[in-house]
Image (tube, helix red, strand yellow):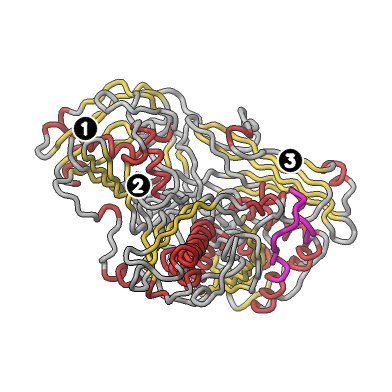
Amino acid sequence: MTTFAAKTVGAAIDRLDGPDKVTGAARYAFEQPVAHAAYLYIVQSTIARGHVRAIDATGARALPGVVEVITHENAPRLASTEDPELVVLQSNAVAYHGQIVAAVVAETPEVARHAAALIRVQYHEEPHDVELHAGREGLYQPDPENVGFEPDTHHGDVESALKTAAASIDVTYTTPHEHNNPMEPHATIALWEGDSLTLYDANQGPHAIRGDVATAFGLEPERVRVISPHVGGGFGSKLFTHGHVVLAAMAAKLVARPVKLALTRQQMFALVGYRTPTIQRMRLGTDNDGRLVAIAHDVTVQTSKIEESVETAAVVTRMMYAAPNRRTSHRLARLDVPTPTIMRAPGECPGVYALECAMDEMALACERDPIEFRIRNEPERDPGSGKPFSSRGLVACLREGAQRFGWQPHTAPAKRRDGNWLVGTGVASSTYPTRRRPTTASVRVNTDGTYRVQIDAIDIGTGARTALAQIAADALETPLERVRLDIADSALPRAGGAGGSMGLASWGTAIVEAANALREKLRTEFAGNVPAEGVEAYVEVGRNPLAERYSMHAFGAQFAEVRIDADTHEIRVPRLFGMFAAGRIVNAKTARSQLIGGMVMGLSMALFEETVIDKRFGHFANHDFAEYHIASNADVLDIDAAWIDEDDPYVNSMGAKGIGELGITGTASAIANALYDATGLRLRDLPLRLPFDI
Ligand code: MOS
């Protein structure tokens, strides 16, 4: 692995696609012009468990403009039913409320929607089970083979250490169902030409969608092309393929016309995933010196009946702080609900919430300042894996952040009062793993001195397009203006998606390696002269072998000021500050935007976000923006993010750690801890709601 000298990398360069976006020239999936398109509208189940007995589509079919009604009776059979999420209309079984049970294709979106409302579905309903609570029946330990991680870990003897600890806590935190709500609803246009399928699709990684759709239809991957030049966010809900994409392709095949499908906001609540609720028991104990002797994190979460998916909330506790006796566990309930998906910092986001509130509680219980307590329990190596950290900037972030924020050390809640406001401050750590995926890329130089970089990367609004061009320019030692970058098309060299904060790290590394290969080729084969037809280099970059030797994570410290109206108990967050250590920052402008974006989502999680299941029917009752509240501009006041310079030669060719998810971790804890500082009340259930009497 080689590195390069940063010139444009690090600069606060405006988004290269900014003008296209603000003028409306940037086309999102649904806006792609397609001749003779028909429109698809989905009909969803109104029961949570059972099967469809009969569908009466007479009224829908009679409506002028209706092209076709699709049900399990006439839907094309899929070649593979391996991925339960993609098995659309293959049987009459209903596994959750809101499942796709029929669809209408019509000449206009309005006719399709109207016709869908005329379809009468009769069900055979069976009793459903949709409620997660602690100690409920049927909780089980998932098989590591199926879920891809070890659910339980033990080191030493937590129980005895807690019994003999000088101080200890045993507390339970909960987080509710939360829904990914990108600005752009999920949308797909499906277009068949013979046996070849083109999808204009809103997703976080075209290659993955291509692979899944090809498998579902039994096609060679080369017969499917997924094109996604602009995507309006995803937060994880667009990383994996969902059933509506398969449905759109199915419908286009059935009616032998291109089909356009855009989910409504309400449909998204059942069809594209959400974050499971979590129940997290935290047990911590300290000795007389304020050092942790034990730390235990036991997590209960839900999955669906059709698929096993686990929110890995306790994994962060394996790595974060030193303690000789440690334990983590994950237990799962299988319910008649849609399958949860990944949502910004899956695992870490709710896990850090519980851990960092528990650390605050423990610090004050053993009479230590929360920052000093964290520094005191800083591990020398990753306590879970025993590996050294490739770099670990937590202490630097806590110290530097404390200074910039104006942290006042304390060992008890300050309960300050400013007029009618109760005022408090809180701190919490942030962290997210630094990983990389195998990736390919090609770079071509032309005789006019311009370069063309090709890679199936994607920009879901993060600024990746701009940051990758900067990386390419520096790797090629050329001005940014000479770099042409093609991304977001599965016809380009294979790459993984924008997920797990791995996008830039993976794509950037492949681009740097391709640039180096190109220069080497030019030097050795062409004596440095570009021939008339240009020169191209293609590389395949594998996993990072150094990940076996080092524990790789980004860190941060977040600080919140909370004000509570003494009469109304309204909770405001006038100040949020995040100090981060995430290796080399590639674009100072888009990076700050990613970090404060994560913090805004953390603020939203702390104060507002909660989807409520109506257990009588098994559906998400507040499935729209009127009732699922998300932080708006008026909720975000003085917010800022900064970073320390961190040189990490091990993570990737740029030394850059991912930042898409780091910002959301810890924000809700800092706010909950600040609320305690203001009131002396420890609220452990999100979203934070004060009782009537405080
Ligand atoms: Mo992110 S939840 O890995 O898209």
Label 2 amino acid?
Gln
- One can see residue 117 in this view: no
Label 1 amino acid?
Leu
- Which numbered disc covers residue 153? 3
How far apart marks 3 and 2 lie (CA) works out to 39 Å
Q: Quadrant of the N terminus?
A: bottom right
- One can see residue 276 in this view: yes
Q: Is residue 66 magenta?
A: no
The main secondary structure of the magenta stretch is loop
Q: Residue 560 at what x, y percent from top left?
A: 61, 69
Tell me which corner region of the image, top left, top right, bottom left or bottom right, holds residue 120: top left
Helix, strand or loop for disc 3: strand
Q: Is residue 184 above or below residue 97?
A: below
Q: Residue 642 at what x, y percent from top left?
A: 58, 74
Q: Is residue 387 magenta?
A: yes
Label 3 amino acid?
Thr
Q: Is residue 323 above or below residue 450?
A: above
How far apart marks 1 and 2 lie (CA) works out to 26 Å
* Left or right: residue 339 compared with residue 546: left
Disc 2 crowd rating (10 Å Cα; few below 14, some 14-19, many 20+) is some
Q: Which residue is mark 1?
A: 254
Q: Residue 275 at what x, y percent from top left?
A: 51, 46
Q: Is residue 293 above or below residue 481?
A: above
Q: Residue 185 at what x, y percent from top left?
A: 34, 52
Disc 3 crowd rating (10 Å Cα; few below 14, some 14-19, many 20+) is some
Disc 1 crowd rating (10 Å Cα; few below 14, some 14-19, many 20+) is some
- CB under 8 Å between discs 1 and 3: no
- Which numbered disc covers residue 658? none
Nearer the N terminus, badge 3 or badge 2?
3
Residue range in magenta is 378-396
